[in-house]
Image (cartoon, rainbow, N blue to C red):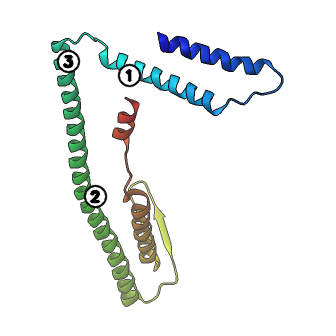
Amino acid sequence: MRTFVILVLALCMSQVGFSRAEEIVPTREQLQTQINIMRDHIKYLESELNNQNRPSDPELEKAYTLTRLKQYEYLRTVMDINVSALHGQRVASNVILWLVVCVTLAGISFAGFQLWKSVAVAGVQTSSELEISASKVRVTSSIVGVVVLIISLIFLSVYATEIYQLRVVSGLQQQSQNK
């Protein structure tokens, strides 16, 4: 209480200087006195905080501790699940990548084989034929192999740029920051 009164008096003394048109600069001793008053008040507040008799219920503290432990267990379990899912996705992603590579290589091989066979059997064809019906699509041309080759390479390119890439999901970090 004593420090509060001294603090109020110090503030009142400092307010007197603001009522004049000219500004009064406090002396070194006045500043030191204000600093000492504030230090005393800080010590008083710290002692009040340390001496504060807060009612502590042992059952409540135990329940709080158990709840925090369960929360940490939950977060650890979620992180473990995310890590195991990431490992599983890595394996699946590699399997799919090799499947795409095999399909692309098969398409390239088929295109090369068809070009080789068409040139070996009939020579270079100058005519092209396209037949579209409800049950089938038939293309007769020397460039079918090139079309299959282009489709295979486009498929590989789209897969590599759009599907086979790592995307970081930061849902757990956002969930932790919201709490």
Percent x, y of residue 178: 40, 31
The image shows residue 72 at horizontal and vertical percentages of: 22, 33
| Residue lying furthest front | 29
Describe the element under mark 2 as helix, strand or loop.
Answer: helix
Mark 3 residue crowding within 10 angstroms, few (<14) / some (14–19) / many (20+): few
How many circles with numbers are drawn on the protein?
Answer: 3
Task: Give the quadrant of residue 122.
Answer: bottom left
Choose the circle earlier in sequence order: 2 or 3: 3
Q: Name which of mark 3 and mark 1 comes first in the sequence.
A: 1
Give whichever of 150, 40 is nearer the camera: 40
Label 2, label 3: how far apart the Cα atoms are:
47 Å
Q: Is residue 161 above or below residue 110?
A: above
The amino acid at mark 2 is Ser
Q: CA distance from mark 2 to mark 1?
A: 59 Å
Label 3 belongs to which residue?
Answer: 61
Q: Is residue 4 left or right of residue 111?
A: right
Q: Tell me the distance, in whole angstroms, between the alpha carbons under discs 3 and 1.
A: 24 Å
Question: Looking at the figure, which quarter contains the C terminus?
Answer: top left
| Residue labelled with disc 1 | 46
Camera-near label (3 vs 1) is: 1
Q: Amino acid at mark 1?
A: Glu
Which amino acid lies under the numbered mark 3 shown in the image of this protein? Glu
Residue occupied by mark 2:
93
Residue at left offset 36%, top offset 88%: 121
Which disc is residue 29 wearing? Answer: none
Label 2 CA crowd tier, 10 Å (few <14, some 14–19, many 20+):
some
Residue 79 higher or lower than 112, as above or below: above
Query: What secondary structure is marked by label 1?
Result: helix
The image quarter containing residue 29 is top right
* Side of 75 where 164 appears, left or right: right
First in residue order: circle 2 vs circle 1 = 1
